[in-house]
Amino acid sequence: MNGVHRCGVPVILLLAVLVGCTRAGPDPPAGAAVGDRQLVAEYFAAANTAAQQGAAAQQRFLDATQHPDFRGARCPLDGATVVSEPAMSTLRPDPGWLPAGAAAPPRGIVHIVAVTATVRRDGVELGTQIGSRHVVVLDGRGYGFAPCLARP
């Protein structure tokens, strides 16, 4: 009985050490800070809410949330709306990304995320595409780059 007692003490100590070293809850998502993830998710939620309110509301949203360094690089949606469903598990930093024609990356933390984008005009679905979108977190806010729709 004495041998069992001596063996049990190290096992209990080992368990206490292991329990003290484990984390409670799931691991944080790889790639992006939790606060940034929230801001990116909120950006897409607000963009989609604006799309539900119509093309003019979404255009105002996109104009207001266009990255400040690229305010002149806007594309009109010409009466269309774009609903983007991000796959947040794919969100990751993309520090080397440059917007088309830019000489330097935008200020802030650049993120890229896979999205399924659906374009509608007058309630009619024009198309759905899987691609990626960039959202930049700057000064505690998510900024995007208005999508440029291809002309038929």
Image (cartoon, helix red, strand yellow):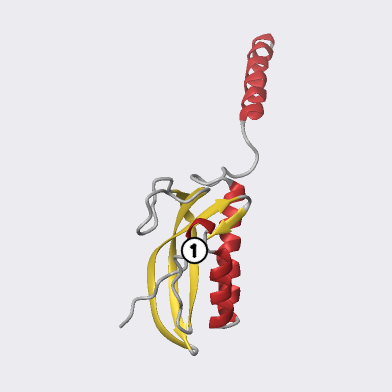
For the N terminus, the image quarter is top right
Percent coordinates x, y for residue 123 in the rendering: 50, 89
Query: In the depicted view, which residue is nearer to us: 152 or 68?
Result: 68
Q: On the picture, is 16 further left or further right than 128?
A: right
Instruction: Look at 52% across and 63% down and name the residue there.
Output: 66
Percent coordinates x, y for residue 71 in the rendering: 50, 63
Q: Which amino acid, by three-letter code, is at mark 1? A: Pro
- Label 1 belongs to which residue? 86
Q: On the picture, is 139 further left or further right than 70?
A: right
Instruction: Look at 48% across and 45% down and name the residue there.
Output: 31
Instruction: Look at 44% across and 76% down and name the residue there.
Output: 118
Q: On the picture, is 99 further left or further right than 36?
A: left
**56 lies above or below 114:** below
Badge 1 element: strand
**45 lies above or below 57:** above
Q: Quadrant of residue 23?
A: top right
Mark count: 1
Q: Label 1 crowding class (10 Å Cα cut-off): few <14, some 14-19, many 20+?
A: many
Percent coordinates x, y for residue 24 in the rendering: 65, 39
Q: Quadrant of residue 18?
A: top right
Q: On the picture, is 150 further left or further right than 115?
A: left
Residue farthest front in this picture: 72
Query: In the depicted view, which residue is nearer to us: 87 or 52?
Result: 52
For the C terminus, the image quarter is bottom left
Percent coordinates x, y for residue 115 in the rendering: 44, 65
Query: In the depicted view, which residue is nearer to us: 142 or 76?
Result: 76
